[in-house]
């Protein structure tokens, strides 16, 4: 097969990237690893660009560049060696994408990153689309925190605007808390204060959007977090078909507004009153979509590869219901028992050291579809 169906003319990068080509992945974690595995199944090679040594994705990729995201020379060399670039985590600097964009198609584009990297942008963007969120206010110092608390009340959560993940960079504020201490706890970085939502459950929608704008949402799933980290995903979420349809529609509105190409995850709270409030966006494949590998016709990783290569999407239909359990830190030592369980599908990420809080792998159990 040819490397690309459309010749790569100067200034007019190929739209469709055919199997045989090389996909560049910014980021070397388990998400990149699973993208590379799905890409290999479709006949693509992957080239991982990651700052850390021995990245999990590098173990299964055709090539790895070990360099900083701001190393312009390394990025230019990388761009020459790949037909399309994607990213597997949202904290890639936007300037990296801006540097690559004139050289090679970058999918999803910079706008998805810009919105999702900043919690204030993200919530403002959602509200502008008519999507509800917890009440929020920007915080830049102790006086603005005090003003935000007077407006939003307690309990509330102070979160850094940028670079927070898995509950990091967050402080809960109760009526008795000292605002100055909370400000200190988030490192005195630009932040937002959010009302703490009294939710019934947390759900997410993982959705793919193709280059031609076709949408393919996976069924909404329920997520349980422990200590701010995803612990378990249940597919489908036990919600009404009406609410599920509302969540899928809302996710479609988001990817359309971003002109997103690839997979994106929308995390939502189902409020006790039964409404949906957006918590955050991940402009990439997501931990709450791992179950799709074992329970759907097309996994989130294959959908992502299809979308960024300009191919038609596969069916997101599930053939089974599923429960996905993350293996965090020492949990990974359960691997012999999990291998002995005939219903368990074990996925390990090739990480040498099992530090507390580190995602080492996951396991998915599937059962016949309930509905
Ligand atoms: P985040 O990093 O924003 O995804 O937060 C991690 C987890 O903290 C979420 O999945 C929720 O379980 C909880 N959380 C975050 N923000 C809120 C909020 N405004 N109200 C209630 N719980 C929250």
Image (spheres, helix red, strand yellow):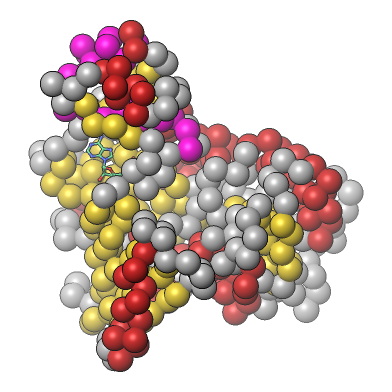
Q: Residue at x 31, y 56 (%)?
A: 230
Q: Nearer the viewer, residue 17 or 167?
A: 167
Q: Is residue 18 visible?
A: no
* Residue 368 inside the magenta-drawn segment: no
Relative side of 162 to 311, left or right? left
In the rendered view of the protein, which quadrant contains the N terminus? bottom right
Q: Residue at x 55, y 34 (%)?
A: 114
Q: Quadrant of residue 304?
A: bottom right
Relative side of 107 to 351, left or right? right
* Residue 146 inside the magenta-drawn segment: yes
List x then y, in percent, for residue 368.
23, 82
List x then y, in percent, for residue 166.
37, 47
In the rendered view of the protein, which quadrant contains the C terminus? bottom left
Q: Is residue 43 visible?
A: yes
Highlighted range, magenta = 144-163
Relative side of 243 to 219, left or right? left
Q: Is residue 355 above or below residue 3?
A: above
Q: Residue at x 34, y 86 (%)?
A: 336
Q: Residue at x 59, y 48 (%)?
A: 108
Q: Quadrant of residue 277?
A: top left
List x then y, in percent, for residue 274.
13, 43
Q: Nearer the viewer, residue 134 or 298?
A: 134
Q: Is residue 220 above or below residue 38?
A: above
List x then y, in percent, for residue 299.
45, 70
Split into quadrants, the picture shows ligand 1 in the one at: top left
């Amino acid at each position: 097969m040819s490397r690309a169906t459309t010749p790569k003319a100067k200034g007019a990068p190929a739209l469709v990237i055919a199997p045989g080509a090389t996909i560049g992945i910014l980021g070397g974690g388990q998400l990149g690893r699973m993208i590379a595995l799905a890409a290999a199944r479709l006949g693509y090679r992957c080239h991982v660009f990651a700052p850390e040594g021995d990245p999990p994705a590098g173990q299964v990729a055709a090539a790895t560049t070990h360099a900083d995201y701001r190393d312009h020379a390394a990025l230019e060399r990388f761009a020459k060696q790949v037909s399309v670039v994607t990213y597997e985590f949202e904290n890639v600097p936007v300037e990296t994408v801006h540097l690559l964009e004139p050289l090679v198609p970058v999918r999803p584009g910079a706008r998805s990153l810009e919105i999702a990297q900043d919690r204030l942008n993200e919530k403002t963007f959602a509200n502008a689309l008519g999507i509800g969120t917890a009440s929020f206010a920007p915080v830049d110092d102790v006086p603005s925190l005090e003003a935000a608390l007077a407006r939003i009340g307690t309990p509330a959560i102070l979160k850094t605007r940028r670079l927070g993940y898995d509950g990091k960079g967050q402080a809960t504020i109760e009526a008795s808390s000292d605002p100055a201490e909370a400000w200190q706890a988030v490192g005195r970085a630009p932040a937002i204060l959010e009302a703490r939502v009294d939710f019934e459950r947390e759900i997410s929608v993982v959705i793919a959007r193709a280059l031609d704008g076709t949408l393919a949402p996976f069924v909404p799933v329920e997520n349980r977090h422990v200590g701010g980290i995803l612990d378990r995903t249940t597919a489908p979420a036990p919600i009404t078909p009406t609410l599920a349809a509302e969540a899928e529609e809302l996710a479609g509105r988001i990817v359309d507004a971003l002109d997103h190409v690839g997979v994106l995850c929308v995390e939502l709270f189902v409020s006790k009153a039964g409404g949906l409030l957006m918590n955050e966006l991940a402009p990439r494949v997501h931990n709450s979509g791992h179950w799709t590998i074992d329970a759907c016709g097309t996994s989130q990783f294959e959908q992502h590869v299809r979308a960024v290569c300009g191919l038609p999407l596969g069916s997101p239909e599930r053939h089974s219901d599923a429960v996905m359990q993350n293996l965090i830190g020492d949990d990974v030592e359960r691997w012999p028992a999990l291998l002995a369980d005939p219903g368990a599908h074990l996925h390990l990420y090739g990480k040498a050291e099992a530090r507390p809080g580190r995602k080492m792998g996951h396991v998915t159990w599937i059962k016949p579809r309930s509905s």
